[in-house]
Image (cartoon, rainbow, N blue to C red):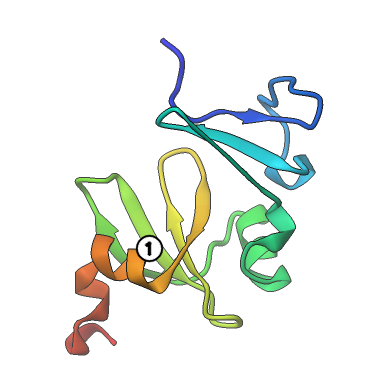
Amino acid sequence: MQSSFFARDSRGKGARGTSIGALDPLTLKRKGKIMTTTWNSKGCAICRQQWEAGRPPPELAVNYELHGRLHRCQSCGAYWEQSERYADVLTEDDARQRYPEAFNAVHR
């Protein structure tokens, strides 16, 4: 069974084992939709380097139903969602919808 998320390089070749930073543009297939974005357009250089080094920005919340974790960069304020296979930026509205507990006054 093929994964619902996979990366392709600019030639359309599979990118298994390739660093996510090496994919430019990064094309992901998600639920039948193709999304194209570049790694360098996500967050800032500081938070991208944290992900690349295996030290993600601070975790704010966990959503067990989605198998996801919400992180926020202390430098640029970008919200990141870490899934089982990759991390991607989220809008604040999406973060609030998926991780409401992170926005409660007690947790801020």
| In the depicted structure, whether residue 56 falls above or below residue 58 | above
Nearest the viewer among 61 and 39 is 39
Q: Position of residue 30 (x, y in %)?
A: 46, 34
The residue positioned 21% from the left and 70% from the top of the image is 100
Q: Position of residue 83 (x, y in %)?
A: 41, 46
**Number of numbered markers:** 1
Q: Position of residue 10 (x, y in %)?
A: 79, 32
Task: Name the amino acid type tagged 1.
Answer: Leu
| In the depicted structure, whether residue 46 falls above or below residue 54 | below
Q: Position of residue 3 (x, y in %)?
A: 45, 22
The quarter holding residue 17 reads top right
Nearest the viewer among 104 and 25 is 25
The residue positioned 41% from the left and 10% from the top of the image is 1
Q: Residues within 10 Å of mark 1 (few under 14, many from 20)?
A: many
Label 1 element class: strand
Left/right placement of residue 44 relative to residue 97 reads: right
Which image quadrant: the C terminus? bottom left
Left/right placement of residue 62 relative to residue 5 reads: left
| In the depicted structure, whether residue 87 falls above or below residue 91 | above
Q: Residue furthest top?
A: 1
Nearest the viewer among 58 and 65 is 65
Left/right placement of residue 107 relative to residue 31 reads: left
Q: Mark 1 highlights which residue?
A: 70
The residue positioned 68% from the left and 43% from the top of the image is 20
Q: Residue furthest front?
A: 33
